[in-house]
Image (cartoon, grey):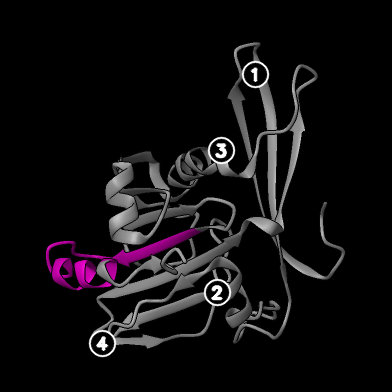
Amino acid sequence: MRRAFKAQSDRRTAIVGNGLGLCLIIISICIPASGLAAGTGQEQPDLTKLLQESQFLLPRHTDLRVKAIAADPVLPYQWRARTRNHELEVRVALRPLDRLHIEYDDPHGGAPQPNHLFPLMFQKLLELMSRNASSIDRVYPRQQAKEKFKADWAGAGIFDVSSNMNTDYQQGFLLALHKNDVADVYVLLLFDHAKKIKAQLQRILNELNFYPDS
């Protein structure tokens, strides 16, 4: 059931095959508003609450400086930081599954479960973020996703940034994480020279994870 409150909505549409033809899936996330992003007039969610709901830990890299949120039409996000030399920007988008609303147009079956949608969303985001819808991507083996990110699924892709995105950086790296019955989290790293930020990027990736299983 969709929650009835004023919200920032992240809406994605995808057409998928289900063995009986093509069907339309519309996925939206409702995020409560609690403040304005600097210079945008957009209401922003309570970050602490979303982190708790998502059971996710932000990177603790000492070189990162938190920045104001800026509106982005492709991936609305809730946390943004840059390295002091501005060579690398990190954006984190939190998507607690309890806030997921699915519209599913298929007379032959029921709506897909939130725990089954993350690969579809990952590919759709890469398509929207990538210049010419071209990217290099991979899915982590399940055990590696669990050990590295405390996730049940993880995928990553690198791409040249589309002009649809609100950024001056030329390249992007998207990390998509899913924890069953909890949340999807998208971490976007933006940069111009991959070789120059390789060590910094790896340190940040090593700090990203869900809460340990209790």
Q: Which mark is residue 55?
A: none
Give neighbour class at mark 1: few <14, some 14-19, many 20+ (Cα, 10 Å): few
Name which of mark 2 and mark 1 comes first in the sequence. Answer: 1
Horizontal relation, residue 120 to residue 24: left or right = left
Q: Is residue 127 magenta?
A: no
Residue, x 37% and y 55% (percent of image)?
A: 174
Task: Return the disc, 2 or 3, that comes first in the chain's sequence.
Answer: 2
Of callouts 4 and 1, which one flags the residue occurring earlier in the amino acid sequence? 1
**Residue bearing mark 4:** 63
The residue under label 2 is 51
Instruction: Kindly report which numbered mark, 4 or 3, lies closer to the viewer in this rendering.
Output: 3
Compared to 153, does 82 lie above or below?
below
Residue 22 is marked as 1
Q: Mark 3 or 1 closer to N-term?
A: 1
Which residue corresponds to the image point at 18% horizontal and 64% vertical from the top-left? 193
The image shows residue 138, relative to residue 175, as above or below, that is above
In the image, which residues are magenta?
185-205
Which residue is at 60% across, 12% downward?
Answer: 19
